[in-house]
Image (tube, grey):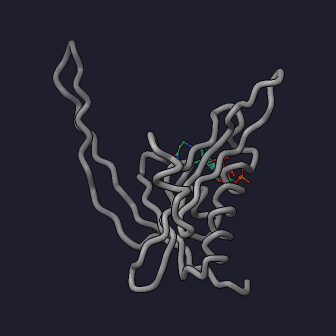
Amino acid sequence: MQDIPGCYLSHPDNCFWVAETEVIGRAEILAMVAVVGRRDGEMCGELFRMIVSSKCRRTGLGSRMTQTVIDFCKERGFSKVVLETSSIQTSAVALYKKLGFSHILSHTKTLILKCFFSSSIYTKYRIMTKQKQVFRNC
Ligand SMILES: CC(C)(COP(=O)(O)OP(=O)(O)OC[C@H]1O[C@@H](n2cnc3c(N)ncnc32)[C@H](O)[C@@H]1OP(=O)(O)O)[C@@H](O)C(=O)NCCC(=O)NCCS
């Protein structure tokens, strides 16, 4: 994130999008998403950095950002879009399910929450890999 032009905008298979609005003459960022093209047998696009500002969630912006990535991957001739999310990110899991991503892989991780006054709390969650096939003509 410290070098967006260097990481995402210097190669035609990568891209970074920001959705913004203007509030009293100043630009305000509402959402962002990135894609990195990589070879996984065939070329695919990996979606990263998806976030929508908490004040405009459930208005369709996350869907539009994801669709932008899907359209980019189609145009580049990639065979699929892949991404990683986690069972904690329930909104993201619901979003990707609605947009037709399928679950291909998962593994469990343990999160240790250190509490100052009591002993540590351990919680398990799943890291999930999801993918959506893309076809240039549909
Ligand atoms: C995940 C995230 C990007 C979704 O953005 P959004 O703009 O709210 O998504 P949309 O409005 O396009 O929602 C599309 C669909 O996703 C599902 N969805 C999204 N948020 C949901 C929620 N909180 N609970 C249940 N379903 C949800 C719904 O099916 C929704 O369709 P509907 O509103 O017609 O029911 C947003 O919640 C976010 O930034 N979360 C924190 C960061 C994050 O988890 N990023 C993903 C990393 S992989």
Q: Is residue 59 above or below residue 126?
A: above
The answer to which quarter of the image holds residue 2 is top left
Q: Position of residue 41 (x, y in %)?
A: 39, 85
Q: Position of residue 98 (x, y in %)?
A: 64, 63
Q: Count the marks.
A: 0
In the image, is 120 to the left or to the right of 46?
A: left
Of 95 and 50, the residue lying toward us:
50
- Please identify the residue farthest to the left as the structure is shown: 119
In the image, is 84 to the left or to the right of 64?
A: left
- Please identify the residue farthest to the right as the structure is shown: 24
Q: Residue at x 64, y 77 (%)?
A: 74
Q: Quadrant of the C terminus?
A: bottom right
Q: Residue at x 57, y 44 (%)?
A: 51
Q: Is residue 23 above or below residue 107?
A: above
Q: Position of residue 22 (x, y in %)?
A: 80, 31
Of 82 and 87, the residue lying toward us:
82
Q: Residue at x 16, y 22 (%)?
A: 119
Q: Position of residue 12 (x, y in %)?
A: 57, 68
In the image, is 131 to the left or to the right of 32?
A: left
